[in-house]
Image: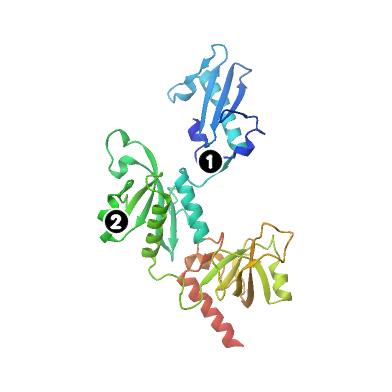
Amino acid sequence: MDQEVFRKKRVRLEKLETAGFIYSEGQYLYHEQILDGDFEVRVQIDENGLVSSQVIDMDLEEEYRAVQVPTARGSFVGQVREAYLAVLENLAATCFEALPFAKDQTNRLARKIEREWGDPYDRPFDKYGDIVSYRIGGKWYALILPLKLGQLGVTGSEAEKAVEVVNLKVDPADMEGLLALPGVYPSYHMSKKSWISLVLGDALPDGKVWELVARSRHLANPNPLANDAGPDFWVIPANPKVYDIDSEFAETKVVYWTQKGKIRKGDLVAMYITAPVQAIRYVCRCLEAELDNTLYPDEPHVKKLMKVELLAQFSDDLLPRERMMALGVRAVRGPRRMTKELREAVKQELRRLTDSK
C-alpha cells in the first residue's frame, strides 16, 4: 500500500522533522497511533528516499499484516486499512512532491529534455493517460509508457515486473548493435524496423540514454529548426500576471528579459502571452544574450539577462493557442524552438506587416 501511495512522488527530506519524523542512524522514523491507540502506523524513510511502513497491533506488539493482504475482507480490517491509508496520504501531501514519472532515471531524462530543448510532453491517448510523448515538428521522438517485462518478450520470473520504457527512433543499420545493449528490446507496439524500447531504470547510464534520445530526435526531424547559417526561431511564455510587458513595450522597443534557454544574439523570439490571452503577441530580435544581471540586484535568482528589440506586435486573433496547436505547438511552458509550420506563419506575417508600411 505504501508503494502505491508514494508512487511518482519524491520525498522532501527537509520537511520530515517538521512533520514529526525523528532522525536516527541514517533513517527518518515516524510513529502515529490510530483507532484510539489500538494500532500504530510506523513509517521509515532512508536518506535515499526509500519508504517502508508497518501497522503494529499494540496489544500484541506485532505487525498487523492483514492490511497488506488485498483478499483480506471484513469491516474491522477495512477500518484499520482506511486509517492506515489516511496517515500515508497525509504524509505524502505534507512531505513529498509529485513527479511526472515513476522511475528516477525517467524523471532525470524529463528534466534534461526541458532544460536542453524546452520540449513539453503531452498525453497522446485519452484512454491511456499514463502514456507520454515528446515531439519535434509534430512528430514523436520519444514515447514513455509503463509496461510489464513480459510485454517485451521476457519470460520466467521477471515477466510480471513493472517497468517504465521509452520508445525511441533509431537507424535500422544500428538495430543489431542496440539490441545487444542491456535494457534494450524490440519496440513495443511500434515498427520494430526503426524503433526500440529502452527500459528506464539505470540498466544504461544517463549519458548513453541521452545519446539515444538525441539521436531519435534528430531522426524524427532531420532538418532541425536551428539554422547554422542564420537565426534560430523561439517562442517563450510571458505571464501578464507576473510582468506587465505591454506597458514596457509601450514605453520602449528594447527591453531586458531573463535569459531563456539557448537563445543567442540574432535569434527571433516570439512572446506567447499566457492565460487569459493565450496567443503570440510580440515578435522580437535578440540583440545580446547571456548578460550578467546587474540591472535587478533585488532579484538575485535572475542570474543572466538577454536584451531584445520589438519587431512587430500581432493581434491576439492571429496566432492564438488553437492555431498554434494546429501548427505543431501544443504548449509553451518554457523556451522552445518554433515548429517549421509556426516559423513560416510568423515569417509570413512579418513580411505582410513590412509590406504594408
State whether residue 253 is above or below residue 290: below
The residue drawn where x is 28% and y is 51% is: 179
- Examine the rendering and report whether any part of residue 281 can be seen: no
Mark 1 surroundings: few (<14), some (14-19) or many (≥20) residues within 10 A: many
Q: Which mark is residue 9?
A: 1
State whether residue 64 is above or below residue 221: above
Q: Which residue is mark 2?
A: 191
Q: CA distance from mark 2 to mark 1?
A: 33 Å
The residue drawn where x is 48% and y is 57% is: 113
Q: Residue furthest top?
A: 59
The residue drawn where x is 63% and y is 38% is: 14
State whether residue 33 is above or below residue 229: above
Q: Give the side of residue 223 with respect to residue 344, left or right.
A: left
The local secondary structure at tag 2 comes to: loop
What residue type is disc 2 on?
A: Ser
Could you tell me residue 60's position as x and y percent? 54, 11
Could you tell me residue 264's position as x and y percent? 55, 71
